């Protein structure tokens, strides 16, 4: 089954109860068809697997294709150490010290 979503304020959004239901015209539609997804403004998502280099973390990005007919997933790669948040480091340290 294809995945469907929308780009809202630069971020990927999928239906709240995806893939089982969408809300269209104030009504919940269970098990929507491709046509119903499209009518509700959702586009198919073309996903790809990241090719993550060692020591990097893959970060997914979603954009419309050139024709505006699908959402395309692309990847950027960040240094793994840069992705750790200071609060996470403190929480790990506190946990280690409790033993």
Image: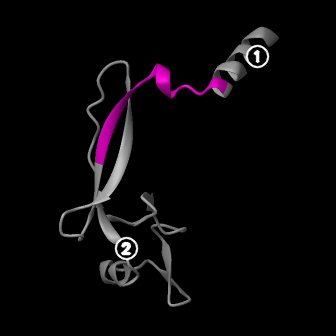
Whether residue 7 appears in magenta in the rendering, the answer is: no
Height in image: 18 above or below 86?
Answer: below
Quarter of the image with the N terminus in it:
bottom left
Q: Which mark is residue 94?
A: 1
Q: Which range is magenta?
A: 74-86
**With 15 as the anchor, is 6 left or right in this view?**
left
Compare residues 53 and 33 and report the one nearer the observer. Answer: 53
Residue 98 placement, left or right of 77 = right
Quadrant (top left/top right/bottom left/bottom right) for the C terminus: top right
Residue 68 falls in image quadrant: bottom left
Q: Residue sitting at 26 percent across and 66 percent down? A: 70
Determine crowd level at label 2: few under 14, some 14-19, many 20+ residues with C-alpha closer than 10 A: many
17 lies left or right of 12: right
Tell me if residue 50 comes above or below residue 63 in the rendering. above
Residue receiving disc 2: 42
Q: How far separated are the C-alphas under marks 1 and 2? A: 44 Å
């Amino acid at each position: 089954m294809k995945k469907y979503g929308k780009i809202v304020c630069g971020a990927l959004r999928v239906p709240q109860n995806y893939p089982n239901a969408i809300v269209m015209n104030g009504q919940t539609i269970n098990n929507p068809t491709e046509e119903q997804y499209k009518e509700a403004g959702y586009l198919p998502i073309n996903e790809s697997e990241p090719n993550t280099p060692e020591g990097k973390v893959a970060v997914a990005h979603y954009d419309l294709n050139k024709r505006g007919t699908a959402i395309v997933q692309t990847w950027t790669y960040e240094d793994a150490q840069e992705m750790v948040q200071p609060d996470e480091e403190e929480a790990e340290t506190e946990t280690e010290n409790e033993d």
